[in-house]
Image (spheres, helix red, strand yellow):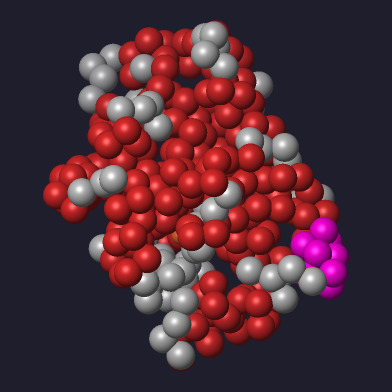
Amino acid sequence: MNTYGEQRIREIVELVNRSEISSIKKTVKEILQLIMDENSSAKDLKDIIERDPPLCSRLLKRANSASYGYPKTIGDIQEAIVCIGFDAVKELALSQKVCELFKKDDIVNGYSRKGLWKHCSAVAICSKMIYRREFGEHGDKIYVAGLLHDLGIIVEDQFFQWHFEQALEKACLENTNLSLVEKEFLLVDHTEIGRAIAEDWDFPEELGAALGFHHQPDLAPEDFERNVLTVFVADYICQREKIGYGDAPYTDEALFRSCLVELDVREKALGIILEELKEEIHKLEQTDWF
Ligand SMILES: [Fe+2]
Ligand SMILES: [Fe+2]
């Protein structure tokens, strides 16, 4: 990136830090710390959620929705953790917090915040499924990476709406990926914005790498190759299956195949994951998640 690009990124991060978008920073950071800390407890999670009353009430509403099928009313966070589980509440809290960024919904050239929210949720779930099924890992960190991977798009949409819409229109007219035309109108692209925010907010480096390289997994820093490649694969599948808004619908199949080889993930396994993902998305649709 040239000096002008760097300066532009700094200005954007400052704008974000003064805006509503930064309201997710604290909760996401605290839940991330909880994920990283093996000794964290249900009480730590409860404390984080209870410090954010709107989040607390939205989460309880979710926990009481039919999808969890719990026979009695869940009255507080402690009870939610006992009834639906520590991990489920952690994910729910994160999603509910991040979802605040996608509230307004206008549809422009195939893009809508609601569509992007569906896409980000699907990439988060799919990435986690790959980690669980293929690597035998918990997958909670990769879930966060999937959820936030297109954070830069939200920033472009909220602060540079005119330029963003021009980029959307061009991508649409020329049948190309948004990430290839953004720089023309905004001087930077959403991967650079996402990565700069993750860095400024002191998010773990692996999270910043997933945000920064999810369209160029071949350039991922060696230490974070696996999580970057996983988000790329999940992103690819969700766009191929048209789950929500896709910023890169014209996919590079050769790159996708080489990532699968690199990750040692077979097509057959991916087919099973895709079926599970579709089921999960269907369940979420029933609860008005998107
Ligand atoms: Fe993207
Ligand atoms: Fe994406």
> Taken as a whole, is the magenta stretch helix, strand or loop?
helix
What is the magenta range? 3-11
Q: Is residue 98 visible?
A: no
Residue under the point 48% across and 60% down: 218
Q: Where is residue 274 in the image (x, y as percent from the top left)?
A: 21, 50
Relative to 181, residue 145 above or below: above
How many discs mark residues in the rendered view?
A: 0
The verdict on residue 7 being magenta is: yes
Relative to 46, residue 64 above or below: below
**Quadrant of residue 69 within the rendered picture:** top left
Residue found at the far bottom of this picture: 173
Q: Where is residue 163 in the image (x, y as percent from the top left)?
A: 67, 79
Residue under the point 28% across and 14% down: 72
The verdict on residue 167 being magenta is: no
Q: Can residue 167 be seen in this view?
A: yes
Q: Position of residue 125 (x, y in %)?
A: 35, 42
Relative to 107, residue 209 above or below: above
Q: Position of residue 213 (x, y in %)?
A: 55, 57
Position of residue 264 in the picture relative to residue 158 (left or right): left
Position of residue 106 in the picture relative to residue 88 (left or right): right
Tell me the quadrant of the picture where the N terminus can be found: bottom right
Residue under the point 60% across and 61% down: 191
Residue under the point 25% across and 42% down: 280
Is 205 or 157 nearer to us in this picture?
Answer: 205
